[in-house]
Image: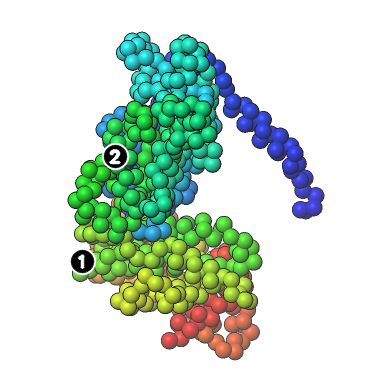
Amino acid sequence: MEENKPRLNLSDMLGAYRREREELKWEGSFHEYFELVSQNPRLAQLSHARVCNMILSAGVEKINEGSLDEINRYKFFSEELYGIDEAVDQIVDYFKSAAQRLEVRKRILLLMGPVGGGKSTIVTMLKRGLEKWTRLPEGAVYAIKGCPMHEEPLHLIPAELRPDIEKHYGIYIEGELCPQCRYNLEHNYGGRHEDMLIERICFSEKDRVGIGTFAPSDPKSQDITELTGSIDLSTIGEIGVESDPRAYRFDGELNIANRGVMEFIEILKSDEKFLYSLLTLSQEQNIKTGRFAMIYADEVIMSHTNESEYTAFVGNRKSEALQDRMIMVKVPYNLKVTQEERIYEKLLNQSEVLRNIHIAPHTLRVAAMFAVMTRLEEPKKANVDIVKKMKLYDGEDVEGFKSRDVKELKAETVREGMDGISPRYIINRLSNALVKDGVTCITPIDALRAIKDGFEQHTGINAEQRERYMNLISLARREYDEIAKLEVQRAFVYSFEEMAKNMCNSYLDNVEAYCNKEKLKDPITEEPIEPDERLMRSIEEQIGISENAKNTFRQEILIRISSYSRKGKSFEYNSHERLKEAIEKKIFADLKDVVKITTSAKTPDNDQLRRINEVIDRLVTDHGYTAESANDLLRYVGTLLSR
């Protein structure tokens, strides 16, 4: 089949690529540009508004809508970032406020959190997003042609005329011409503002257009000119005056980031003289360059750091001025197991190793359970343990708890999510297990073993943490034991759904009759009979419903049935989480002996062998196992049940 598949022609692809780039080019006079802006004022928006519009254009959905902890999930970030919606929500709130030209736009956005938490990914997504956004019609950006700072063309309008422009056209203008554009206007265009050439630009970090990046290095060798530009030695001899804009290169990172985003990598490691440049830029929106007056710059300044460096920075009284000009957003580790799984899937799917190696179902989930538990603070409530807390955070129903309890659990924490095992460590250990010679499959037990074996190599784990992590490995394994037994028990029932449905219908018939004080008809004699109390209790006892609590539980089920009926929906066995759990446990309790005898038999007879092969087939067909991983699962569960 692959041989007959038509191959893409490389020349055609490159030709289409060049045509797309040509279509993005536009050049005209300032007069023509002003006509475009008068029809669409958003063309002249400031940097924070540009970023905000880019994010919002991708769409927003509500999480926990209507509840006390309702937040937004921004689709711009949701494909790459998982489980840190609250931090992302705060970041977008910053851009929303800054887009309205409120004072927060004059603040540096600082992301603070543990390593591997997603800080640099957020900044990278914004940078890559802007590169794509400015290539779209709605994100188009225009600049004075030849300006090293890709300047907004509206700066050509003199300050005296701007109030009238805003009054008649609704166009807000902020900023002044850079020295080079001011020189060109007077000497090359004879002061005719409307004739200056304007071009469309596309942001590109590689081409140093609209996106700047600065990483601190040795303070002795690093020069402030990396940020603010330098004298052009090739022209200074000819021009002779350092204050002439033709003798200066306005190519520092702060210059080229104008109109877009400036990233400071590990900002708090920078030398003081670099931080002072940021003070002026953030508060005054000006860059001080050499022998020139202040140069206006409109850019988003973002950085990221870890907690220890931030704590030292806050404790240094010399840095108070800069602290006052920062907005800090905590970016903790993800605390939801399902989201952690998605992180691992994303990182592993980037590798070719998965083409030849099977990762058994629940392997990533069990690894995620361990990782998340390392990041959680021990609950203070007596009736909550760390496993229950993990499940509540992930949105699971836990008996005796409601959604408001999650908010209380979070409120009692101090630094939850700021410590623990990072996704990088888990991926490193899984990778180590995947590349071992002869490995064709890894199971949840393999994953936990690989994670445990790596503790000795992890330089950031002390003896106390190691002991705690070993206990959490045991808890994660205990959770997997229950998952494994459930998986096998399900596979033993050929028509599990049908059996569960029949049991549910029988239970509901009896509950309705019991609550309404009615009788049922015997299916054979059609004589009226009392509701089957023994059947109802055999199901309810599976989830710990006491004799005193049975009436309340049955009324709750009846209310749920009525609610579904009003909405025109059919009530199924899985429509009520606790009823679903009770029915499953009842079925599995009835099956336990059969499963135990079959899976633990060292020399199975023909009937047992037939049943084992049927179960393996179902695990492979319906549950995502391979024959090898299904056999491993059966052996493991057989060992558990025979203990």
Residue identifier under label 1 = 380
- Element assignment for label 2: helix
Amino acid bearing label 2: Leu
Q: Position of residue 571 (x, y in %)?
A: 41, 53
Query: CA gap, disc 1 to disc 2?
Result: 43 Å
N-terminal label among 1 and 2: 2
At a point 23% along the width and 48% down the height, the residue shown is 319
Badge 2 density bin: few <14, some 14–19, many ≥20, Cα 10 Å: many
Q: Is residue 120 left or right of residue 238?
A: left
Q: Residue 277 location, x and y as percent?
A: 33, 40
The answer to whether any part of residue 57 appears in the image is no
Please tell me the numbered disc located at residue 279: 2
- Asked whether, in this view, residue 271 is left or right of residue 130, the answer is left
What's the residue at 37%, 34% (across, down)? 290
Instruction: Name the residue: 55% across, 87% down.
Output: 601
- Residue 553 in percent (x, y) is at 28, 61
Q: Secondary structure at mark 1?
A: loop
- Report the coloring of the rendering: rainbow
Tell me the tag on residue 32.
Answer: none
- Label 1 sits on what residue type? Lys
Q: Farthest residue to the right: give it.
A: 4
At x 42%, y 56%, the residue is 339
In percent of width and height, residue 607 lies at 61, 82
Above or below residue 101? Residue 427 is below
Nearer-the-camera pick, 64 or 556: 64
Mark 1 surroundings within 10 Å by alpha-carbon count, few (fewer than 14), some (14 through 19), many (20 or more): few
